[in-house]
Image (cartoon, grey):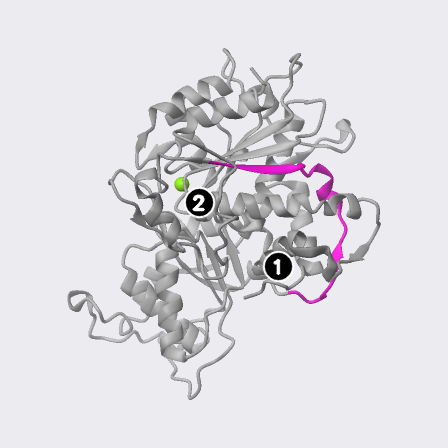
């Protein structure tokens, strides 16, 4: 567990690069160097007398949707958030741990479901931050998940992609669990198949046994399952994983298994077989700070598009899962509360973070080390990406999804979080609990004095 590891300079350079540019942002040189989202301003109110200095980050499943069903309170909530022309009155970003679609497709889906115009620049998928990890983009990756995973991997920047299904076709003797799917003949090209260099886990696959077997084969053979190494290679190939949700809420009365459950199986099997702990090179999606950091930046860009006079002071996160939405928001709030921005803005190159800065910043700094391997312990590069930082992040829990008061005793007594994000009660405790998303928006407006 990397609870005390510092940030690497390289990782922050990557962060600054992508956060400055945004995933689809274009620079607007005429606007004093500020960045504006292309074609975005039209869709927001500008020049209002009363302007918000807060933004809202929405989880989707269990907050706005239950499976394919739109929650009626969500429609009412978005009426409140938009004016008569359909323009957003408040900067709004959607932060989902879903990973089975492209963000532009998710935006279209949200537009249809919520009856408002949502742009791709308002959507953060669990895999969105992988775009900044360029050091893996030229590697031959094995990608696991369902839906258009090859298109998603390409969109993120990966160039050399093999899906689990394609890999299975090339190595037909590996997948033996389902007797009816077994193939008797080996593939003549197995020995010539280019070595897998990294594993990318986008979301839960359909046939878990197939993916578990083939991923383990790659980890145990350094990406060459046509061989049988005499010793277990360790450390193993880089593993980049998105979405740690153990459970999520669909139409069924009880929560469903999520990608976090699949990761739990993979970790357990790897450890049981090798005696070693499976390590993640990258973990994205809530509750990771890199995802909140990215969402914060997009919200600031939206505020720019709306030409708000003052920077956003508070960001509200509305979610249904205490161990992802709420935990991540509180973890990120700790980082914001430590006010590194005020220290960092006044320096020019790098600064040393001392251990005496305490838990607040170290919690953020430690967990963000999940996004890469630190090479420069103690050094944090200074960058103006921090200039747009909000002052605080508040967490709002709704009772329409994973969290339900009827199940609350059961849900809060057990640690459902990911292994690398240890449970603490204060991190899983929301600032506000309300019944549904409409009440959440109403409560936020009341607190902010916004009508
Ligand atoms: Mg949810």
Q: How would you rate the neighbour count of disc 2 (Cα within 10 Å): few for under 14, some for 14-19, many for 20 or more?
A: many
Of label 2 and label 1, which has the lower sequence position? 2
Residue at 64 percent of width and 28 percent of height:
303
Check disc 2 and report its element: helix, strand or loop: helix
Q: Which mark is residue 322?
A: 2
In the rendered image, residue 388 lying in the magenta stretch gets the answer: yes
Residue 37 visible in rendering? no
Q: Nearer the viewer, residue 431 or 129?
A: 431
- Residue found at the far bottom of this picture: 230
Q: Are marks 2 and 1 in contact (CB under 8 Å)?
A: no
Q: Which stretch is magenta?
A: 374-396
Q: Is residue 62 above or below residue 218?
A: above
The answer to which image quadrant residue 370 occupies is bottom right
Residue 72, percent across and down?
Answer: 34, 23
Q: Which mark is residue 366?
A: 1
Q: In 3D space, how far apart are the residues under numbered discs 2 and 1 (Cα atoms)?
A: 21 Å
Residue at 37 percent of width and 35 percent of height:
399
The answer to which image quadrant residue 345 occupies is top right
Q: Nearer the viewer, residue 413 or 159?
A: 413
Q: Is mark 1 within 8 Å of ligand 1?
A: no
Q: Is residue 184 above or below residue 397?
A: below
Residue 69, percent across and down?
Answer: 30, 31
């Amino acid at each position: 567990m990397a609870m005390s590891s510092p940030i690497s300079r390289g990782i922050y350079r990557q962060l600054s690069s992508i956060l400055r540019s945004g995933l689809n942002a274009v620079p607007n040189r005429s606007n004093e160097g500020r960045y504006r989202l292309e074609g975005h301003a039209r869709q927001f109110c500008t020049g209002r007398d009363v302007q918000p200095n807060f933004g809202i980050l929405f989880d989707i499943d269990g907050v706005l949707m239950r499976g394919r069903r739109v929650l009626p309170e969500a429609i009412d909530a978005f009426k409140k958030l938009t004016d008569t022309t359909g323009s957003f009155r408040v900067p709004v970003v959607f932060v989902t741990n879903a990973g089975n679609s492209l963000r532009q497709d998710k935006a279209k889906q949200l537009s249809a479901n919520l009856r408002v115009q949502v742009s791709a620049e308002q959507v953060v998928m669990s895999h969105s931050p992988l775009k900044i990890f360029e050091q893996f983009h030229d590697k031959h990756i094995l990608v696991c998940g369902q839906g258009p995973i090859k298109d998603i991997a390409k969109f993120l920047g990966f160039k050399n992609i093999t899906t689990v299904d394609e890999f299975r076709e090339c190595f037909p003797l590996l997948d033996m669990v389902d007797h009816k799917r077994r193939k008797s003949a080996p593939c003549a090209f197995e020995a010539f198949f280019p070595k897998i260099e990294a594993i990318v886990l986008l979301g839960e696959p359909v046939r878990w046994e197939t993916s578990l077997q083939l991923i383990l084969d790659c980890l145990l053979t350094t990406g060459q399952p046509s061989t049988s190494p005499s010793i277990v290679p360790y450390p193993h190939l880089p593993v980049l994983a998105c979405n740690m949700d153990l459970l999520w809420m669909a139409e069924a009365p009880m929560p469903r298994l999520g990608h976090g459950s699949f990761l739990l199986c993979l970790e357990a099997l790897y450890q049981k077989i090798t005696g070693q702990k499976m390590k993640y090179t990258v973990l994205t999606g809530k509750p990771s700070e890199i995802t909140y950091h990215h969402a914060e930046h997009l919200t600031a860009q939206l505020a720019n598009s709306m030409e708000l006079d003052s920077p956003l002071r508070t960001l509200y996160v509305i979610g249904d899962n205490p161990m992802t939405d709420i935990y991540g928001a509180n973890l990120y709030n700790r980082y914001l509360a430590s006010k590194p921005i005020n220290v960092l803005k006044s320096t020019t190159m790098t600064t040393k973070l001392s251990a005496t800065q305490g838990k607040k910043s170290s919690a953020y700094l430690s967990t963000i080390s999940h996004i890469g391997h630190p090479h420069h312990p103690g050094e944090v590069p200074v960058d103006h990406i921090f200039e747009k930082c909000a002052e605080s992040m508040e967490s709002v829990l709704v009772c329409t999804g994973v969290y339900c008061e009827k199940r609350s005793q059961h849900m809060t007594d057990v640690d459902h979080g990911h292994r690398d994000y240890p449970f603490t009660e204060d991190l899983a405790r929301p600032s506000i609990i309300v019944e549904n998303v409409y009440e959440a928006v109403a409560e936020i407006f009341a607190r902010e004095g916004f009508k």
